[in-house]
Amino acid sequence: MFSVIVPVYRNEATLGALLDRLDSMYEKLDQSLEVVFVVDGSPDRSYTILDEALPKRRFRAHLVLLSRNFGSFAAIRMGLAAAKGPYFAVMAADLQEPEELIVDFLRSLQNEPVDIVLGIRSSREDPLLSKWMAGAFWHVYRRLIQQSMPPGGVDVFGCNQQVRDALVQLNEANSTLVGLLVWVGYRRKLVSYPRLPRLEGKSAWGARRKLRYMLDSAYAFSDMPIMFLTVVGLAGVCLSCLCGLMVSIVWFAGFITVKGYTPLILTILFSTSLLLLGMGIIGGYVWRAFENTKQRPLFLPMLHKTYGKEDPP
């Protein structure tokens, strides 16, 4: 059985064409397909349309309505938990991924020694400014947060039962599903594809959501902000000591005549830098406590084989 998870939010205009594509995928996958639709608190008629249309379709379907809008990552998690598998793929409801890509995901998981298949955009039908900003975003992300993230990020993916169980087990708030997908490791395959132009509506991923995504990723997968604060504080202490030596020499030489200037400058430079260094050190302890509260497993075994005969009793 192949499972496809489709998060739905403000997609009522594309649902008819989406269901037709899924019918086509049902045939290509030898009539072994289930689809889990997760309506993420959508304010339009998406749930009603699916509720009326799904009984008329040939593929097996689940329809889940969330109580409010929790975000696409939470909706995908819900779909993964509800799907039967053992092979899973995530598909957007805006029709920007070709159906052949999802079929390729599932076939690769079934027939090749891979655990995760990641869809990588080979081209973008976006305005030049949006394309440049997306490229800059993912460059910074890969440089500072997760170096193993594919260039251009990940929009759609497929995985096997083992990876699905690991992702569902990592029940973290204020994190990113794509970041966790890269964090778990396993055997990966990258599949490039041309992203199709959006037929209806516009992307909900504006500048505000991208900034929130970057901050969640930084706090969940990197100690970079704390290390930056520590390095700046340590550099400031060294610099203030050097400046203090220079100011003291100038004061002894008689070039500073304003009373109280020298101790005031030295106190401000040194105390501010010391505070930054102290915050960085304390932040290191807070970061480690924060990591423990996530309760991520210390390891995720991928293969376990036993060779040879058992010892006699």
Image (tube, rainbow, N blue to C red):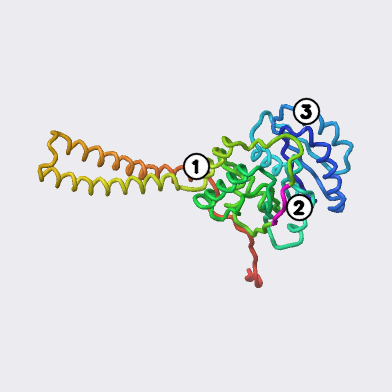
Give the residue at mark 3.
Answer: 45
Q: Is 194 one of the magenta-colored residues?
A: yes
Q: Quadrant of residue 5?
A: top right
Residue 92 pos. (x, y %): 73, 42
Instruction: Give how far apart the Cα atoms at labels 2 and 3 are.
Output: 28 Å
Local crowd size for mark 2, using a 10 Å CA cut-off: few (<14), some (14–19), many (≥20): some
The kind of residue on which mark 1 rests is Thr
Q: Residues within 10 Å of mark 3 (few under 14, many from 20)?
A: some
N-term-proximal mark, 1 vs 2:
2
Q: Please tell me the numbered disc located at residue 303.
A: none
Identity of the amino acid at label 2? Leu
Q: Horizontal and vertical percent for residue 55?
A: 87, 36
Q: Which residues are magenta?
A: 191-195
For disc 2, the marked residue is 101
- Determine crowd level at label 1: few under 14, some 14-19, many 20+ residues with C-alpha closer than 10 A: few
Front position in the image: 134 or 266: 134
Mark 3 → mark 1, Cα distance in angstroms: 39 Å
User: Rounded to the nearest whole Å, what is the CA distance between mark 1 and mark 2?
Assistant: 37 Å
The answer to which of marks 2 and 3 sits earlier in the sequence is: 3
Q: Which residue is mark 1?
A: 293
Q: Residue at x 64, y 61 (%)?
A: 303
Task: Look at 71% across and 51% down and name the residue there.
Answer: 158
